[in-house]
Image (cartoon, coloured by chain):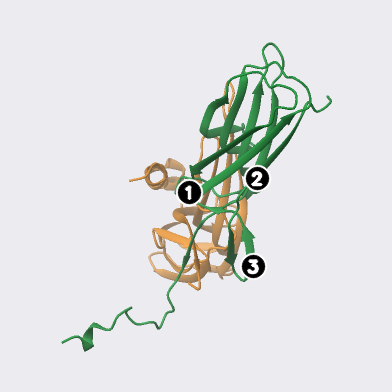
Chain colours: A orange, B green
Amino acid sequence: MSHQDTVHSQRSARQASWQSLNPLTKIFGMAEVVIDTPERLNLGESFSCRVTLVPTKRTKVRKVLLEWALIEEAIVRGTSDSTYRTDGFLDSRTPIGATTLEAGRSYELAEQFAVPLTGPPTFYGANHSTYWCVRLRLDVPWWPDTRAQRLVKVEPTLVEGA
Amino acid sequence: MARHYDIQVNIELPEYRIAGQTVRGYALGDTAEVSVRLVPRQTIKCRGIWLEFGYREHGQGSTWEHLLINEMVFTRSLQHGAEWTHLFTQELPSEGPVSYAGKYVNYTWFVRYRIDIPIWPDHREEFPFTVLPNLYEAPPADAGPASDWSSVS
């Protein structure tokens, strides 16, 4: 396993455990979310993403946002490190608009995304990183949004005609 | 500061066709071939010349350089008019970063020659170049196997 693969799997595991163990998610979370995507993709490749959303309570939402994003992460080293993140690329969809989600009912969302040909592959450097993720956000009025995210490794391989 | 020397660096960048466009740059895993020609305009008292080859992460965060080559390739003072040439090859790592300029993150590959001058700021000459991802052409979706084994009896 390469160094980049190791770092990626560590980050994915850390994020998954944080999402499941975060006490704020337990208190304020309105739904259980499972995001299903391919583990690895190549530049220029299209993929389908399936999300299963099971509200734990009857939830009124403004919208449900499903996003395919490139995250640029920069760390300023110093006495205390500061981390900055921004979206370098964002493909945002709204599969569900303003509605009320019923508790216990399973909502299946499916979207098709593509990795841009010119996008950078996943790379974890010493102070700068670029990585891709699919993330879901339930926009709940007057309540903390419920969020979930899954990292996808984009290989430094460009597939033309895929 | 007046230039004390003339330097020419030739980086042999191959051409690739990506999405109908011709792009010049090395793909990850390629072997970079670089030649340099330096002609001092005056005698430069120095310890020697360092070759530095690698990539730099920079942008919003702290700058970091990862050098694949960092070695002294010439170990004398440079004499006026004495031409110095150097040629080297280096394989690019298959999982290194590709050249990228984003909002917070930039990855820049470079070749740098550094003239090491005692008790004085070194002269540095840096030459960036483009690194592309590995290129792979997907087979057509309806393509069958490369060889038809059903006809083999």
**Residue A141 x/y as whole percent:** 60, 57
For the point 72% across and 19% down, which residue is it? B44
Report how far apart the C-alphas of labels 3 and 1 lie in the structure. 50 Å
For the point 39% across and 41% down, which residue is it? A3
Report how far apart the C-alphas of labels 2 and 3 lie in the structure. 23 Å
Left or right: A4, with B58 as reference point: left
Image: B126 above or below A64: above
Residue in the foreground of this view, choosing between A123 and A109 = A123
For the point 51% across and 42% down, which residue is it? B89
Residue under mark 2: which chain is it in?
A: B
Of the residues shown, which amino acid type is indicated by label 1?
Phe
Of the residues shown, which amino acid type is indicated by label 3?
Gln
Q: Which residue is mark 1?
A: A28
Tell me if residue B85 can be seen: yes
Q: Which residue is mark 2?
A: B10
Other-residue count near label 2 (Cα within 10 Å), few / some / many at <14 / 14–19 / ≥20: few
Of the residues shown, which amino acid type is indicated by label 2?
Asn
Q: Are marks 2 and 3 in contact (CB under 8 Å)?
A: no
Q: Are marks 3 and 1 in contact (CB under 8 Å)?
A: no
Q: Which residue is mark 3?
A: B21
